[in-house]
Image: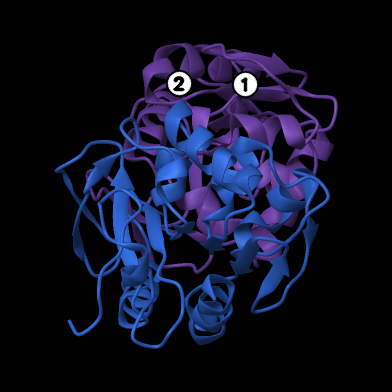
Chain colours: A blue, B purple
Amino acid sequence: MSYVKYSKMDSASALSAFSIKGSFMSRIAVIIADMFEDVEYTEPAKAFEEAGHEVVTVGLKAGETVRGKKKQTPVKVEKSVNDVSADDFDALLIPGGYSPDKLRGYAKPVQFVKDFVESKKPVFSICHGPQLMITADVLRGRSATGWKSIAQDLKNAGANYQDKEVVEDGNLVFSRGPGDMPAFIRASLAKLG
Amino acid sequence: MSYVKYSKMDSASALSAFSIKGSFMSRIAVIIADMFEDVEYTEPAKAFEEAGHEVVTVGLKAGETVRGKKKQTPVKVEKSVNDVSADDFDALLIPGGYSPDKLRGYAKPVQFVKDFVESKKPVFSICHGPQLMITADVLRGRSATGWKSIAQDLKNAGANYQDKEVVEDGNLVFSRGPGDMPAFIRASLAKLG
């Protein structure tokens, strides 16, 4: 790739924190488990990397391969959620499918998401992604959207649910599902600046 | 089978409404879609039929075959939810897995579940089954349990969530998942009388 990769974890100089396009390069965590909605990981991750950002997959167990629910896309989990913190990253992506349902049954991924939302760093969630934020109880009073099946859960969690392709509230970007992908990616990239 | 099958929809005589064990025979709807948790359909259905009750699968489309998420158990949908009402049955079973997530995105299955709960007929739900009741908004003030990932959703829906193998509240029977199966079946059969 033609751009300089930057990570707060490595010893890259401040200069390398700028992409060839002149914008700040972010290190983006993706919290992921089996049965993620394939394109909700692959498409944003591709767009983020093409824009010069770094994408790091975070899951229950470092080194394991998780698979998407439709296309069986294999994704290697780079970091265990037990070994990282929100401080190590600049932003968070939560793909949907049934990955969030699997993750929200554990305390660590829920705390990781909670820390991100409270840190005011950008959090991009799509489809069933907001389920993790519901369990983290961080949506009270926030505008949000998500897959239609979780609409009532979002309302009950205190969110102002809106049936729109993109809903933004402060550091949070939400979309409903794969059909909203171009708008979701556009809004997410804009938050990374 | 050695028992007499009874259905309120057919012209069976009142006498045939009693099983060989002397109890009333119920016609039990199972609301089901793809990716149900296999044993949460197969085991209660087997137990209900063995006790002399009738089990009727109800889904989005009559005649389609849906499959379980783990064992790919094929189940033929006998009735479309568009063609039946809670009046046609004596009880409802809601298996878990990701079937409830698929069903709760549609108005008819949600209304079907709502009608059952409000009719005071027995409703047996396990694992992710209560998600349909959350969308139907019928859990306010009721005691409930379910799979750990939906615990916060149940609380937010106004339920008194309890981490127990069986929770009963009036006509409702809940269990957390496959590990609670014997207790779930026992409590459900008891409600059928």
Q: Nearer the viewer, residue B170 or A14?
A: A14
Q: Is residue B87 left or right of residue A117?
A: right
Residue A106 shows in this picture? no
Question: In the depicted view, which residue is nearer to us: A153 or A164?
Answer: A164
Identify the residue at image location x=43%, y=60%: A95
Query: Which amino acid is tagged 1?
Result: Leu
Question: As displayed, is residue A136 above or below residue A40?
Answer: above
- Who's the residue at 53% across and 57% down the image? A128
Q: Quadrant of the C terminus of chain B?
A: top right
Left or right placement of residue B192 versus residue A43 in this view: right
Q: Amino acid at mark 2?
A: Ala
Residue at (56% x, 20% y) in the render: B188
Q: CA distance from mark 1 to mark 2?
A: 10 Å
Q: Is residue A111 shown to the viewer in this render?
A: yes
Q: Who comes first in sequence, dot 1 or dot 2?
A: 2
Taking depth in this image into account, of B98 and A3 the one nearest to the observer is A3
* Chain to which mark 1 belongs: B
**Residue lying at 50% horizontally and 47% vertically, measured from the top left:** B56
- Residue B183 falls left or right of residue B121: left
Question: Under tag 1, what secondary structure?
Answer: helix
Residue A25 x/y as whole percent: 40, 70
Where residue B51 is drawn, which disc sits there? 2
Residue B85 percent coordinates (x, y): 72, 55
Please determine whether, in this image, residue A165 is positioned above or below residue A55: below
Give the structural element (helix, strand or loop) at label 2: loop
Across and down, in percent, residue A161 comes to 77, 61
Residue A158 in percent (x, y) is at 80, 46
Vertical order, A82 against B102 (above or below): above
Disc ID at residue B192:
1
Q: Quadrant of residue B142?
A: top right
